[in-house]
Amino acid sequence: MHTFQLFADYFQFYIQDESAEGDLSDAWSDEAVERMLATAPGVVGIGTARNMEVPVTLEILEAEPPLAADAWEHIVECTLATASGRLAIAGCTDYFPDAARMAIAPGTYRVRACYAGLATLSEDGLEGEDRYHLALWPAPAIEPTVIKQRAA
């Protein structure tokens, strides 16, 4: 498991194929904001509760993990296609050459993004116990899907 502290500027961070040229600027529709997930070719944007540093864990698995729905407030899934053999993970305004990178076999992956602590933010929105977990495994492509919707 990989562990990160990512600066979620603009309330988001990215995981993407290192060579992807996908652009999320038009992908953050009202629907994407509601599901806290936007996609473009080779890129997944994960929405966050704060625009501060947030804790993120990432697992690259060989098969679909069990769904621990009771452990998370919000769960979404989507597809991430990789061609370069390297994933990058970073805040959206981070300097991309400095982004953390992981080796991954080229192919089509399911991304399950799990969110917890979304309602723990301080009144000013700067502090909180929100956390984000990403699991990736080889799987056929799907449309972005909400598995569990956070309470409004």
Image: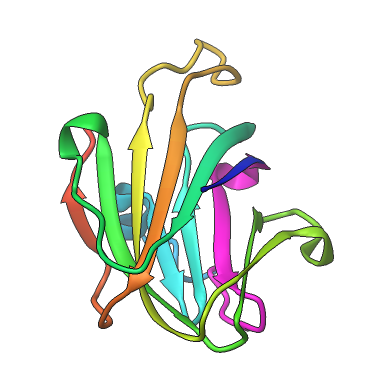
Q: How is the image coloured?
A: rainbow
* Camera-side residue of 88 and 122: 88
Lateral position of residue 7 relative to residue 144, left or right: right
Lateral position of residue 88 relative to residue 109, left or right: right
Q: Which residues are magenta?
A: 6-24
Quarter of the image for residue 51 reads top right
Query: Can the viewer see residue 152 in this picture?
Result: no
* Camera-side residue of 95 and 71: 71
x then y, percent, for residue 38: 41, 63
Image point 20% across, 40% down: which residue?
A: 68
* Residue farthest to the front, as pictured: 62
Image point 56% across, 80% down: which residue?
A: 22
Q: Quadrant of the C terminus?
A: top left
Lateral position of residue 32 relative to residue 90, left or right: left
Q: Is residue 11 above or below residue 121?
A: below
Lateral position of residue 127 relative to residue 80, left or right: right
Q: Is residue 25 above or below residue 120?
A: below
